Image (tube, grey):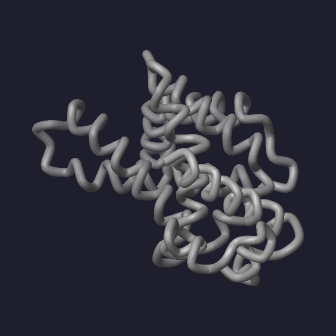
């Protein structure tokens, strides 16, 4: 099995290097294989397509590492996740622009949804609108992370998470203020 990981890491490294100079859409499996002196058969033995490789990179570099840490609060998890994206923003800016089936955006959305479903089921266990809440927060997190990553002057992860936290914790205050203002008109 260690040989398998060596091959996968070589392919991942090649893809990352290629993405420094080429858009993801212009990179073929042949390009990735050529960059690391492997044949296409080796690639397809490990991955379905280049999208699968991107998802593997995220899973092995981020998810596996985050899962091994014992988080006491969701904010710690979010801080580490965002720090990972910030440290690898060149790569993820490019992968997050790709949409559609098997894309990293879809994979990441599914992961967020899974995490939120589990956590929110405990909070809203008796609520018929659980699916709506999960979809709403999943879309909000994905949109916020993409907007943050695509910003030319991408703020540091710690600052981004603090703003997210402040926004989420102040939701009631904001809604009350909006409600009062709309009642005055």
118 to the left or right of 96: left
Rendered position, 104 above or below 171: below
Q: Residue at x 78, y 76 (%)?
A: 34
Q: Nearer the viewer, residue 15 or 131?
A: 15
Rendered position, 129 above or below 96: above
The number of discs equals: 0
Q: Residue at x 63, y 73 (%)?
A: 98
Q: Residue at x 50, y 71 (%)?
A: 45
Q: Please state the horizontal and vertical placement of residue 38, each as a whole percent of the image.
A: 70, 72
Q: Nearer the viewer, residue 96 or 185?
A: 96
Q: Please state the horizontal and vertical placement of residue 179, each as a whole percent of the image.
A: 43, 42
135 to the left or right of 80: left
Residue occupying the far left of the picture:
126
Q: Nearer the viewer, residue 54 or 181?
A: 54
Residue occupying the far top of the picture:
72
**Quadrant hosting residue 176:** top left
Q: Please state the horizontal and vertical placement of residue 26, each as a whole percent of the image.
A: 75, 83
Q: Residue at x 73, y 65 (%)?
A: 15
């Amino acid at each position: 099995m260690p040989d398998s990981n060596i091959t996968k890491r070589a392919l991942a490294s090649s893809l990352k290097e290629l993405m420094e100079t080429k858009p993801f859409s212009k990179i073929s499996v042949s390009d990735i294989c050529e960059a690391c002196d492997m044949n296409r058969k080796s690639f397809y033995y490990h991955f379905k397509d280049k999208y699968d490789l991107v998802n593997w990179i995220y899973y092995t570099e981020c998810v596996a590492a985050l899962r091994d840490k014992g988080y006491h609060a969701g904010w710690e998890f979010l801080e580490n996740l965002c720090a990972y994206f910030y440290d690898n923003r060149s790569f993820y800016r490019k992968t997050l622009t790709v949409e559609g089936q098997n894309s990293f955006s879809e994979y990441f959305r599914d992961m967020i949804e899974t995490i939120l479903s589990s956590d929110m089921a405990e909070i809203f266990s008796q609520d018929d609108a659980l699916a709506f809440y999960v979809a709403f927060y999943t879309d909000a997190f994905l949109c916020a992370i993409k907007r943050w990553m695509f910003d030319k002057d991408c703020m540091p992860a710690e600052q981004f998470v603090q703003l997210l936290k402040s926004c989420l914790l102040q939701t009631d205050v904001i809604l009350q203020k909006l409600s009062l203002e709309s009642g005055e008109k």
